[in-house]
Image: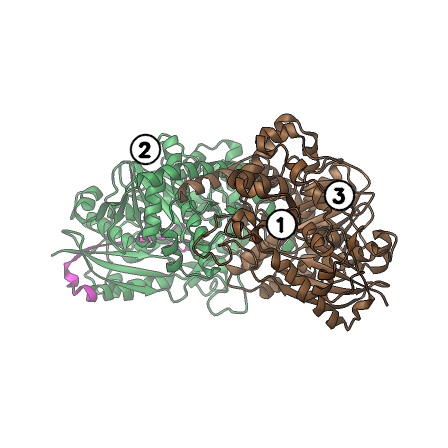
Chain colours: A brown, B green
Amino acid sequence: MTLVIGVDFGTLSGRAVVVRVSDGAELGSAVHAYTHGVVDRHLPGRTDQLLPPDWALQVPQDYLDVLRHAVPEALRAAGADPADVIGLATDFTACTVLPTLEDGTPLCELETFKDRPHAYIKLWKHHAAQPQADRITEVAAKRGEGWLRRYGGLISSEWEFAKALQVLEEDPEVWAATRYWVEAADWIVWRMTGTYLRNACTAGYKGQFVDGSYPSESYLAELNPAFADFPATRLDAPIGQLGQSAGTLTAEAAEWMGLPTGVVVAVGNVDAHVSAPAAQAVAPGQLVAIMGTSTCHVMSSDVLREVPGMCGVVEGGIVPGLWGYEAGQSGVGDIFGWFVENSTLGHEELSERAARQPVGAHGLIALDWHSGNRSPLVDHELSGVIVGQTLATQPEDQYRALIEATAYGTRLIIETFRESGVEVNELIVTGGLQKNPLVMQIYADVTRMPISLLDSDQGPALGSALHAAVAAGAYPDIRAAAAAMGRVVHGAWTPISSNSDRYDALYAEYRTLVDYFGRHGNDVMRRLRKIRREALR
Amino acid sequence: MTLVIGVDFGTLSGRAVVVRVSDGAELGSAVHAYTHGVVDRHLPGRTDQLLPPDWALQVPQDYLDVLRHAVPEALRAAGADPADVIGLATDFTACTVLPTLEDGTPLCELETFKDRPHAYIKLWKHHAAQPQADRITEVAAKRGEGWLRRYGGLISSEWEFAKALQVLEEDPEVWAATRYWVEAADWIVWRMTGTYLRNACTAGYKGQFVDGSYPSESYLAELNPAFADFPATRLDAPIGQLGQSAGTLTAEAAEWMGLPTGVVVAVGNVDAHVSAPAAQAVAPGQLVAIMGTSTCHVMSSDVLREVPGMCGVVEGGIVPGLWGYEAGQSGVGDIFGWFVENSTLGHEELSERAARQPVGAHGLIALDWHSGNRSPLVDHELSGVIVGQTLATQPEDQYRALIEATAYGTRLIIETFRESGVEVNELIVTGGLQKNPLVMQIYADVTRMPISLLDSDQGPALGSALHAAVAAGAYPDIRAAAAAMGRVVHGAWTPISSNSDRYDALYAEYRTLVDYFGRHGNDVMRRLRKIRREALR
């Protein structure tokens, strides 16, 4: 019996799962919470210095602690012999990025820099580099930089260049001491193997690495002369392809986890993207929606197209040999949570009552923009709307309308792909919301597509295990691993045609309101934000 | 010391107040609830026969019981000698209307008709005559009937003609037995004096009596040939002017109330309209807003103009010699109540938190159409909207946005008057909401007008008392009575200029959304209602 281990690094904790190579059976798992969680108030031990708004940092030792604790515990839970483990792979949130020395030592671990916020890991949801991101997009658009189209025309404040430029401009000493600007996804692999490779997925989606090169020096110099050499001096590491071996465990790393030193470690990867092969979604047109507080959509395709508002398209970004597309909805489960928090009824009661209604009976239509819109509008100044309330409107009516709004949002993304010439043939759901029957039926009805489910509670960790098996040579490629180890229940939910008919009419109303409020029919939402900022000044 | 009595007949109860003629002091009052309240489920004693939806009836004896109980109690509470009472006046909800015999006996009191719903009083909020109202408007518009303009272009299902036509078409036997089609406002005066006069106020606003005549026979015949003689055969009573004497108490009526038979009774009147002189609003441009679950606006003017969406303009409809305008908002306090009912916080907590916010800080804008829009759009297929919600939006934010929306609604009515050439110089508030400081300050800020308050908890009953004093000859006219007996606190609330500046920006957004959702920019609300009706079929 040969085994592999997948380790999924999330926002607040890491999870390890021990998986049988022959059939993907999950034999045991363990979770370890980060001691420092999300550092968004003050640096560790420095309660006297508050961080500015929109900052979100992490502490690198927390990641190593996951290896030290979760991996041995998962092995024990599986009753596994460590000698049977042939490979290990990891996936990470992204873009989560840190400055290091030549040997990978994080700057925040140096005595000199331990009180400097910019020396820490910037978590994906660090949003304080918005001014830098705005300039990055603006200057690129002005110069007609071709790579901008690969990102739907907009570069996010969450990504590598914006976060790096913020360090350069706000703490030049930290910047000067930075040898590498490293994705946490790659740093953890570097720590385990002693080898630093930049994985193709984050380099492409988050690092503006397009067709083999980074943005030009002349472009970067226009952002800031001192930024011109950023790729040459701080991103200069070889690219590793997904599912490749990055090396084997060092003696030190092997000891942390109680594993033999021969264990192969795969190139780093991203949580959403590894979920696709775990759900056997390795063919063109299989859209995987990772649905939780927000939703991330990943899909491979054999064609390269410009899709308005996508997060990015990267060659081999999900599986080798295909274009990997990413899109997203910035608020989904958190919108439902927000509503319930302010409601007199709980989730269960609301769901039960909402499920009893015929489609359209509540007379409402909502826009799911409470957290802005990522795809296809890429606009975080947008906000929520609900239309049609009467004195007879009940909480469950509004709750259902919000769920439907997120389903319309997914349908809009699917239609945007199709209208751009990228086929979407199947909808596969994973993440916490796959367990909500009301949500799943509404999504099937609204999209008129059967919904398949990734049949695992730990999709990303399972996806990493598949990559470990490929890296260790147990399967020739990720497709073969997906076929043997992936798990999907096809058609778990099927559309009810009479519901879909009525949803077609409601979705037409949604699109009209999307154009009006989101595409400059009426910029009231942006003006309300402006008035709000002035009022709070 | 001479005294008068005002009796206000509301939807659920009647209230009597004893008032000193010299200065309007309210010496004592009493309330008596209607035994049958609103009859909207089944006729008294006929639980086996449910009434159809949208029906709302009342029972005439309930009104007489108010005279029997509330008037003597008010006299006792005032410690008054009935011999000091020189006059009595009443005001009523409208259009509240019933079929009677030649002598005023309600048909529902006859053994033959006591089980026939159409024999009962149709309360103002009986909305089952909508098909008749639609035809009344349509045919008038098609024929270019001039009187239609006096009603902002639309005849309501609440009014005399629609309700009468419903009886004719649904219960011809009741119709055949109907000698008079009587406003309850006039029936109660008839019962007290033995004299039947149609008061100028309801005849004008609710009875389509324009410039001395009713709609023509040829028009009415086009609605239904049997309806052609309606005015000639069922509305044929002399018109009484407001503040005139209708006669003196009959022996029977005097006995009910414990009053002398010499007491003068004034011509009937309407609750909203009598409030104007109680607040000394007898000059052109003084807009009185009676603010409760909904808001009614009444204002006199020396000019006759077509004001889009007003409920009506009637010569002497509020005070003699001026054009009386009426407008309204169909949902105000009931929208706040609806929100609180579904909120985790109560009215007080919400108000306190909302009051602490700078204007515009919540980032929201709402439309106050949860109960449709009466003025200026006259469209009950409209519904509520709220724009700008984020995951940080709190219940008090939405609560405040709803209050503001109703204030924008009032400002829109004021601007519609002004844009039509009718001056509005002062805003006077009465009704339950005048006690809500948050609401009052927001209304002052949004309208940029100081707010005056009618300084009484029983504005309509006080207003009736003024009319009683005029009818009894204690004052030469209602203006003189208003000056001596009316009570207003001028400038109780004044606009805060920095708030008003920010509200100007928000109100501009409101108007844009009014045009979009209410004036056929996007008829989504009407379509949502249609989808809803189909879903519930």
Kindly identify which residue carries mark 2: B423
Amino acid identity at mark 3: Ile
Q: Which label sits in the foreground, 1 or 2?
A: 1
Kindly identify which residue carries mark 3: A239
Q: Chain of mark 1?
A: A
Q: Residue at x 65, y 30 (%)?
A: A217
Q: Which label sits in the foreground, 3 or 1?
A: 3
Q: Chain of mark 2?
A: B
Q: Which mark is residue A405?
A: 1
Q: Decide if residue A361 is in sight here.
A: no
Q: Do marks 3 and 1 both belong to one polypeptide chain?
A: yes
Label 3 SS: strand
Q: Residue at x 80, y 71 (%)?
A: A81
- What is the distance, in whole Å, between disc 3 and disc 2 at their CAs? 75 Å
> Dots 1 and 2: beta carbons under 8 Å?
no
Amino acid identity at mark 2: Glu
Which badge, 3 or 1, is on the more N-terminal residue?
A: 3
Image x and y of residue A155, in percent: 63, 38
Q: Which residues are magenta?
A: B76-105
Q: Chain of mark 3?
A: A
As drawn, which residue projects farthest toward the left?
Answer: B1
